[in-house]
Amino acid sequence: SVFENPQKASLSVAQRIGNLIKEKQKNNDIAVLGLATGATPVAVYAELVRMHKEEGLSFKNVVTFNLDEYYPMQPDAAQSYVSFMNDHLFDHIDIDKNNINIPDGTLNLEDIPAFCLEYEKKIGDVGGLDIQILGIGRTGHIGFNEPGSAPNSGTRLVTLDDLTRRDAARDFGGKSFVPTKAITMGIGTIFKAREIILMAWNRKKASIIKKAVEGEISSEVPATYLQLSEHVEFILDEDAASLL
Ligand code: GLP
């Protein structure tokens, strides 16, 4: 769907997440959310916080799994995705801290494969992701699945693309300070979600959105894999959709 502006688009995504949480509450069930970072979902989180504060939406029955984290990364660093999620969402809602899952950027290299398997298992143990929200990087990455990622890939350590590190340079005060690696859910992990929502706003996303939606399916643009799923929806503003 194409919305007039990012604000309206974000409200509709937040509404869907809120409805899912309430639906699950009625049945005494948990809602399992796959969450993303970056500028794109910020207004979605702001609206969820507003729904919590003003409408009493509770997150007690919510379990979350974030897509990715830089590696190496200390959780208390300003640029960590832990800090991002705390600042934009978790510190402002009533979620149980034990229900929050974010890949651990502090592990030793040798421990990462076991951690990644455990991350996949944890998602499975709570019944799988009800909804996964995604942004898109200019390389066509979803999560940090850079060009070359396999369609059945699982959670793993990856090397970041140069363009991705350049785009992150501002947050880190220069590209040389951006970690070279990340731990990310795989394309296969994302695909198992019962519903996938990819959001993109602004002119600078228009060309990658055109490739993702209309381009040939290829590992060169990992987001093109989404064309293969029937549970995917692209939520765009008019600028991001302008080349479609
Ligand atoms: C990072 C994140 C992605 C996100 C992308 C786009 O690379 N790992 O999950 O989609 O940035 O960021 P933005 O939303 O700021 O454009």
Image (cartoon, grey):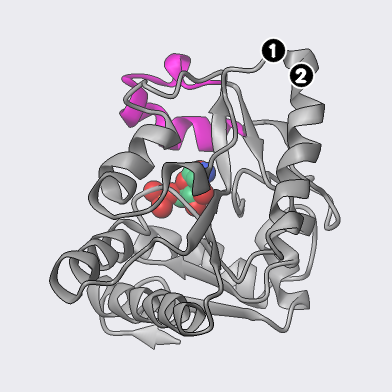
Tell me: 180 left or right of 96: right
Q: Residue 224's quadrant in the figure?
A: bottom right
Q: CA distance from mark 2 to mark 1?
A: 5 Å
> Magenta segment, which residues?
161-179
Q: Residue 8's quadrant in the figure?
A: bottom left
Structural crowding at the residue carrying mark 1, measured as other residues with C-alpha within 10 Å and reported as few (<14), some (14–19) or many (≥20)? few
Picture residue at 40% right of the left edge, 48% below the top: 38
Q: x, y (%) of residue 241?
A: 43, 77
The amino acid at mark 2 is: Asp
Q: Residue 156's quadrant in the figure?
A: top right
Q: x, y (%) of residue 68?
A: 57, 41
Q: Is residue 167 magenta?
A: yes
Structural crowding at the residue carrying mark 2, measured as other residues with C-alpha within 10 Å and reported as few (<14), some (14–19) or many (≥20)? few
The amino acid at mark 1 is: Asn
**How many marks are shown on the rendered structure?**
2
Q: Which residue is mark 1?
A: 108
Q: Are marks 2 and 1 in contact (CB under 8 Å)?
A: yes
Does dot 1 land on a helix, a strand or a loop?
loop
**Magenta segment, prevailing SS (helix, strand or loop):** helix
Q: Which residue is mark 2?
A: 111
Tell me: 8 left or right of 201: left
